[in-house]
Amino acid sequence: MPAPTVSQATLDEIALSRAEYEAIVDRLGRAPGGLELGLFGALWSEHCGYKHTKPLLRRLPGESNRLLVAPGAENAGVIDIGDGLAIAMKIESHNHPSAVEPLQGAATGVGGIVRDIFAMGARPIALLDSLRFGKPQGDSHIQHLLHGVVGGISWYGNCIGIPNIGGETWFDDSYAGNPLVNAMCVGLIENARIVSATAKKPGDLLVLVGADTGRDGIHGASGLASRTFEEQAEMRSAVQVGNPFLEKVLIEACLEAIDIPGVNGMQDCGAAGLTSAAIEMAERSGMALQVDVSKVPRREEGMTPYEVMLSESQERMLLAVEKRAVDAVSELFEKWDLDATVIGEFHSGTDVVVFDGEEKVSSTPIEPLTSAPEYPFDAPKPGWLAELQSTDPGRFGTPDVSPSDALLKMLASPNIASKRPVFRQYDHHVQTNTVVEPGGDAAVLRLKGTVRGIAVSTDCNGRLCYLDPRAGAQAAVAEACRNLACVGAEPVALTDGLNFGDPETESVQYQLTESIEGMREAALKFGVPVVSGNASLYNESAGTAIYPTPIIGALGLFEDVTKHATISFKDAGDAILLLGRSETWDGVGNLAGSEFNAVFNDDASGQPGIDLALEVRVQELCRRAIRAGLVKSAHDCSEGGLAVAVAESAITGGIGATVESPLPERWNAALFGEGQSRIVISVEAANAEQLRSIAAELDVPVVQIGTVGGTNITFGDSTVSHEAAADAWENGFERATSA
């Protein structure tokens, strides 16, 4: 039947296309009412419905003998780590809200990912953040975004008492109009007590707990997260407002509530608010649901059913509770000075029915609401990309500066310089489990009551993904796992934050397809499942998309957490070895997408690549050597190449280092090329032969490149003082990001 007329302005407000509206009419056999249309807009949004990514995400490996919750089945993935313990983990984005209101956008991003974790019955034990901004030098707006986002993360995370133990902050002009704010949370589940976001049987009651509902965040999922900035009107009302002190007590109350007999399920009220939380809970449960919005506690007068259902007010959770348990639940939440209100009931059937008191305001089958259309695509490789890949990244030659001056400039680049000005604002020792602090390759946490521990890391180089989405995504997985290997942990699970531009364009479709295929190939090679994640699309402004940025969060496991390494050189006379190569210096081809070319030539060109089989062997060698007690330090060779990796290990260790091989004519590539699958380690000279023996067994090339010691950092005949290098690296970020 022909679709009745609905204004384009209405469809634009909820980010539905005309064709999608017609599909809704076809599925319902009638025109949707006003509230129904809002429900469809939210649940068919990119943020909730994954219209452009679901067919691709099904290709990601999600199997493991450690896996306890299948990817996408619940709020977060869950991995068994033994001894009756499990880890829940997920990464989420809050990009568009953070661009509009950086402090609240970032803060509520933290709050949302934390709720996803404790909704699983897990106590949140760690946060990480992965941030992208435009180049900050001399740009007051970018600096405003940076300081607002970091302020929001620190304010919220510090108040709720969860350590922020790692992450990354990276700058490029592709993010100037569209910053990326991705937050990862890890939670600990004890006694295998996993909570599902489901009701168990008809008659279970839907209980809303936590904050009162206001008008903040309406159309956050369908508006901010499903359109480019050019398509958005003034969207400040779509940004949620956080209350971390309320979330702190909500965590405690909810984790206590799951021990009450008759509390059957728990769900976060996140994107799309009650609409997504309640209806998806009913869909998972295979039941119908009645909701009475008149019972929802409100902090604003005159709210309509539409506003109540679509509000994204923060610090709210839904519980599925048997009638016998309602009084106990109410008493518990009253003890924590929180509201607990019965707003609905699960029934046999297939519809969600919304009442406003006695008035039925909508009745809709659940299946079409939760079955957003899917848009598979098979876009060709863009011509502009083939041209970029065929461009010689070494065409510029060496710059008109000395290698020493080049090193100091590289160490001061905000993409390389110490991020201490960021992470010093975060409490990374609350809960007293932190073994290795932020600032290294991966953070390490002990698990109290055991000798075991976990390591966590996030990583992605968007510039490499821009030049080759498949190879760049492979490198993101490899580097996230390499970070774990550098502290000695075995990777056991991945989570992804997929940040891309407009999926309705062929270039972004190609980037999405190739990136996810690259992630798949790498995860299979490592034998590690992708257990959870998030897709954030339409990240572009002024008609230009961000670099494709599939951020990878990785979880690693220690059988003995005392057997770990850090990046810092320790003792004079120790040998410096390079794992993964038989020669010291890198080649010109590995300047492709390098930080050196970005800093000195404002260039991103060339063909990046990675040998995944070698990568797996290199990481296994590093782990074995750490467990055998051979390794004094280990550091990933990534942005800035070998010279930066050696300098960072020297600076953080407070000691000098010498790399002895003479510099070749193309010293820029030798020092700053970014070839993959390389780890710089230091060992006692007497242990070098034993390490080579393990390397031979694993078929990993190794070369001794230098010695720890002295007061300078030397490469061939090029020397910088330790003091000058430390000043550039330790203060470069603050200098670049200050007015």
Image (cartoon, rainbow, N blue to C red):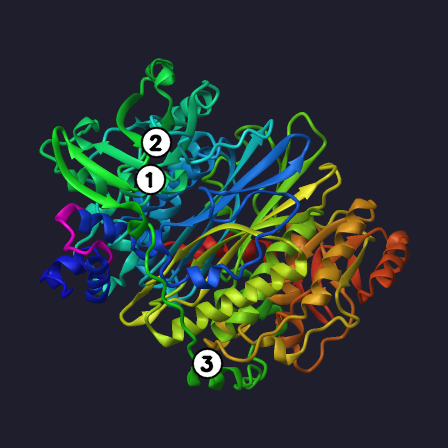
Q: Nearer the viewer, residue 446 or 91?
A: 91
Q: Earlier in the sequence, mark 3 or mark 1?
A: 1
Q: Nearer the viewer, mark 3 or mark 2?
A: 2
In the displayed structure, would residue 569 be above or below residue 350? below
Whether tag 2 and tag 1 are in contact, CB under 8 A, the answer is: yes
Q: Would residue 84 appear left or right of 628 to someone viewing this image?
A: left
Q: Identify the residue position indicated by label 2 in the image.
A: 318
Q: Nearer the viewer, mark 3 or mark 1?
A: 1
Where on the picture, by quarter, is residue 431? top right
Q: Identify the residue position indicated by label 3 in the image.
A: 381
Q: Would residue 515 appear left or right of 254 to someone viewing this image?
A: right
Label 3 vs label 2: CA separation? 45 Å
Where on the picture, by quarter, is residue 690? bottom right
Q: Identify the residue position indicated by label 1 in the image.
A: 277
Q: Would residue 703 appear left or right of 557 to someone viewing this image?
A: right
Residue drawn at the location 37% of the way across and 36% of the way down: 268
Label 2 vs label 1: CA separation? 7 Å
What's the amino acid at mark 1? Ala
Q: Would you say residue 652 is visible in this rendering? A: yes
What's the amino acid at mark 2? Leu
What's the amino acid at mark 3? Lys
Q: Secondary structure at mark 1?
A: helix
Q: Would you say residue 436 is visible in this rendering? A: no
User: Which quarter of the figure is the N terminus placed in?
Assistant: bottom left
675 magenta-colored: no
Position of residue 564 measured from the top left corner of the image (x, y, whole percent): 72, 43
Position of residue 589 measured from the top left corner of the image (x, y, whole percent): 62, 80
Q: Which residues are magenta?
A: 27-35
Q: Secondary structure at mark 2?
A: strand
Q: Earlier in the sequence, mark 2 or mark 1?
A: 1
